Image: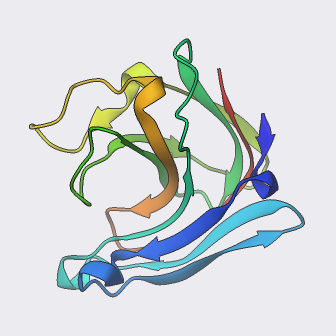
Amino acid sequence: MTPAGDLAWSYLADTVMGGVSQGGARMEAGILRLSGTVSTANRGGFIQARTEMPEGLAPATTALRLRVRGNGERYFIHLRSTRTRLPWQYYQHGFDTGPDWAEVTLPLADFAASGAMMAGRIRPEDIRSIGLVAYGRDHAADVSLAALGAV
């Protein structure tokens, strides 16, 4: 697994589309921490830290593995690919968190397309970004990612 601190992360929120969620992503001793307040007001509902994957993942990749902890909320990984052309298109898989570090494995076959006009499955070599996302409901977000790997 790659330490989260070895990847370049950028923060974005629903404010790019008029939403009102607030937060930030920062590195703390090599660990990515995404925190803030997610609000569904004004058609919003997300904060995200994203890393680019310009070369995609190895074609034999079947899953992503994360080392995470959080405040007990459910969080998501969003994948964008060469086939997700519109800003609101992604493939999504959720995971639950707790106060202790845990390894989570997310099979690529279980990622769901965000829209009907997208291919049903994502190909690992087509992945262009991976996002750690607090999404979809009003809540306080606080999730940390220590490492990310392809299996």
- Pick whichever, 97 or 93, lies toward us: 93
Measured as percent of width and height from the top left, residue 91 is found at 34, 40
Q: Which residue is outermost to the front?
A: 55
Q: Residue at x 49, y 48 (%)?
A: 129
Q: Can residue 44 be seen in this view?
A: yes
Q: Which residue is outermost to the right?
A: 29
Q: Which residue is drawn at 34% across and 84% down?
A: 15
Is residue 6 positioned above or below 79 on the image?
A: below
Q: Can you say which quadrant of the picture contains the C terminus?
A: top right
- Pick whichever, 58 or 46, lies toward us: 58
Q: Which residue is drawn at 28% across and 83% down?
A: 19
In this rendering, position of residue 114 left or right of residue 97: left
In this rendering, position of residue 73 left or right of residue 84: right
- Pick whichever, 74 or 17, lies toward us: 17
Measured as percent of width and height from the top left, residue 111 is found at 37, 31
In this rendering, position of residue 13 left or right of residue 6: left
Q: Can residue 140 be seen in this view?
A: no
Q: Residue at x 27, y 45 (%)?
A: 84
**Within the image, what quadrant is residue 136 found in?**
bottom left
Measured as percent of width and height from the top left, residue 32 is found at 72, 62
- Tally of marks: 0
Is residue 113 positioned above or below 136 on the image?
A: above
Q: Which residue is outermost to the top?
A: 60
- Pick whichever, 49 or 34, lies toward us: 49
Colouring rule applied to residues: rainbow
Is residue 117 positioned above or below 119 on the image?
A: below
Q: Which residue is outermost to the left?
A: 117
In this rendering, position of residue 56 left or right of residue 120: right
Q: Can you say which quadrant of the picture contains the N terminus?
A: top right
Measured as percent of width and height from the top left, residue 10 is found at 57, 69
